[in-house]
C-alpha cells in the first residue's frame, strides 16, 4: 500500500505547493490501483505549507506529487521520509496514474510561481 499526497486546487494539481487549497490523499494498492481518496484542507494560516510535513507524515504519506515548490519544502518532506516528484500538472488522478505508470519523474523544478521566487517554501 502506498499513500500519495497531491497539492490540489479545483481537482487539479496545484502549480504552487505553498498556495494549494487542499491536499488530495490517495491510497494505492500494490498494483497501483486507487483504493481510497480523501481531501485534507490545511488551516488558512499555514502559509507555505512546509509546516504541514509532520501532519502528512502522520497520515502515512510516503509520496508527494506536485507542480512546483522550493527546495526548503522538498528537503523537509524528504527528511520526513516523503519522496517528492515535481513538475506534475493537470487532473489529480491523471497525475497519479502517470506516476504509477513511470511516466512522471521529478523535474527538479524550482518554485517560480507568479513571478516571484518562493524562498524555500
Image: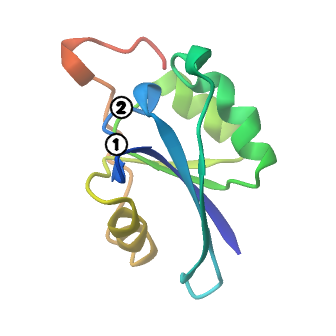
Q: Residue 113 appears at what percent x and percent y?
A: 26, 23
Question: Residue 67, labelled with which disc?
Answer: 1
Residue corresponding to mark 2: 16
Q: Is residue 109 left or right of residue 81?
A: left
Of 99 and 24, which appears nearest the observer? 24
Residue extending furthest toward the right: 58
Q: Is residue 10 left or right of residue 7?
A: left
Answer yes or no: do the residues labelled 1 and 2 have beta carbons within 8 Å? Answer: yes
Residue occupying image coordinates x 26% and y 22%: 112
Mark pair 1, 2: CA separation:
6 Å
Find numbered disc 1 in the image and state the secondary structure of the residue it sits on.
Answer: loop
Residue extending furthest toward the left: 115
Question: Along the polypeptide, which appears first: circle 1 or circle 2?
Answer: 2
Find numbered disc 2 in the image and state the secondary structure of the residue it sits on.
Answer: loop
Q: Residue 70 appears at what percent x and percent y?
A: 43, 25
**Can you tell which quarter of the image residue 9 is in?**
top left
**Can you tell which quarter of the image residue 1 is in?**
bottom right
Q: Residue 80 appears at what percent x and percent y?
A: 73, 39
Relative height, residue 7 to residue 96 (above, below): above
Labels in figure, total: 2
Relative height, residue 118 to residue 35 (above, below): above
Q: Residue 24 appears at what percent x and percent y?
A: 53, 53
Q: Is residue 57 left or right of residue 33?
A: right
Amino acid at each position: 500500500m502506498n499513500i500519495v499526497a497531491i497539492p490540489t486546487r479545483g481537482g487539479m494539481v496545484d502549480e504552487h505547493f505553498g498556495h494549494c487549497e487542499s491536499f488530495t490523499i490517495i491510497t494505492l494498492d500494490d498494483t497501483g490501483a486507487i483504493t481510497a481518496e480523501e481531501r485534507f484542507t490545511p488551516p488558512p494560516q499555514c502559509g507555505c505549507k512546509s509546516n504541514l510535513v509532520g501532519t502528512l507524515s502522520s497520515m502515512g504519506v510516503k509520496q508527494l506529487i506536485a507542480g512546483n515548490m522550493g527546495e526548503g519544502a522538498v528537503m523537509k518532506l524528504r527528511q520526513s521520509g516523503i519522496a517528492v516528484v515535481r513538475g506534475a500538472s493537470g487532473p489529480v488522478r491523471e497525475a497519479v496514474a502517470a506516476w504509477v505508470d513511470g511516466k512522471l519523474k521529478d523535474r527538479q523544478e524550482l518554485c517560480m510561481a507568479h513571478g516571484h521566487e518562493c524562498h524555500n517554501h
